[in-house]
Amino acid sequence: MNAGRPAHPPMLQFPVIDDCLRIGGIPLTQLAARIGQTPFYAYDRHLLDERVALLRRTLPPAIDLHYAIKANPMPALVQHMAGLVDGLDIASLGELKIALDAGVEPSAISFAGPGKRPAELAAAIAAGITVNLESAHELETVARLGRQHNRRPSIAVRVNPDFELKTAGMKMGGGPKPFGVDAEQVPALLRRIGQLELDFRGFHLFAGSQNLRAEAIVETHDHIFGLALRLATDAPAPVRLLNVGGGFGIPYFPGDTPLELAPIAANLERWLPLVKERLPEARVVLELGRYLVGEAGAYVAEVVDRKVSRGHTFLIVNGGLHHHLAASGNFGQVIRKNYPVVVGNKVVGTEREVVTVVGPLCTPLDVLADRTELAKADIGDLIVVFQSGAYGLTASPMAFLGHPPCAEVLV
């Protein structure tokens, strides 16, 4: 059958036994019964462990790994990740509370994002975490709050570089951006930091995200290290933190291939001796989110109706874009493409058909899979969306149309 969209490569991270997917070693039907509801997200802790272990084996030992909580802030997942990585990166007061509850040392937490409110900055200063400065105004606010609370704030400068991460799914640097301080303005900001006598820790350079081309990440790292070494000549204190961002992507769509880590690791190995020579106190940090957790998660919804409209079959499920905006194609996709999807309790099935999987919302945007080949599904079967461990539930309009909330489990 070839009337559907192009096929994805097989998703092999979750085993299939008796034609039923297993997550966390549990048959999907049993897991759904244990949770007691659909829809739900399930995250496999063994896959989280494996991904961090892969990075530890491949990257130079001197590289620190930080988990960017924004990718998935589920508290149990963050707690688990906290035991695997060297630090956490947050983007709000809510994420700060989750990070501290996970037991991470405040010195291993950094706070990025434009438009931080004074209350958020005051909480960060009180907690003793590192604030990644995004503007000259934010610097003055941090200094004022430090004086008010009789604390010496720990700060780093988030730099908006004069280059971008090529072929990135989302570009976070280069050109006019709301993120960070333009590289050409950083020397003046560093001089002001010295006048204010803050606890300067270093730099945060984040150029983009969701990149599957190792050569693009290697080129960006070359630019990042060169820029950081130049900026360090104006630093008011030794650089102790050099966060070179992330950008590591995962395959979502037909034709995507997994990111090759070896060239990235080799290039980091080439740069580290020079960094050590020029910035002897600096810890080099890779800040990763999606790459750590994205492939370890699945979104599961139940078929509540099937209908044929003018010759085309629709599977209507009880979940949709209000839980998984990204899978619907409404979270940054220019041309909508399908995430990999299967009938989780009939992965291969005895019959196949081309169908469109839609949610219960009263909008034509609520599509989880368009014209894709699946096993023939009946009411009560479970539709699984792979690659759902990052930017899922909390990146979605959960209150839209007032449908019930979605469960999350770590298994």
Image: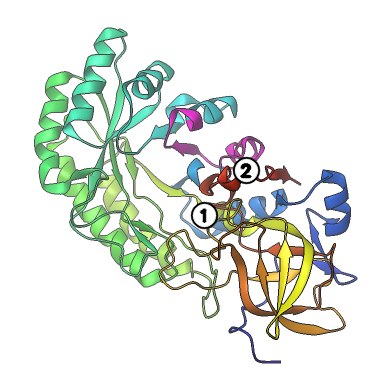
In front: label 1 or label 2: 2
Relative to 407, say whether 28 is above or below: below
- Name the amino acid, label 2: Gly
Report which residue position mark 2 lands on.
402
Q: Return the x and y of residue 313 as percentages of the image width and height.
A: 72, 79
**Front residue of 18 and 349:** 349
Where residue 169 sits, quadrant-wise, is: bottom left
Report which residue position mark 1 lands on.
290
Is residue 87 inside the magenta stretch? yes
Q: Return the x and y of residue 136 as percentages of the image width and height.
A: 16, 32
Q: Return the x and y of residue 241 as percentages of the image width and height.
A: 33, 38
Residue at position x 53%, y 30% in the image: 99
Is residue 260 inside the magenta stretch? no
Number of other residues with Cα within 10 Å of mark 1, as a class: few under 14, some 14 to 19, many 20 or more: many
Number of other residues with Cα within 10 Å of mark 2, as a class: few under 14, some 14 to 19, many 20 or more: few
Which element carries disc 2, helix, strand or loop?
Answer: helix
Q: Which residues are magenta?
A: 73-95
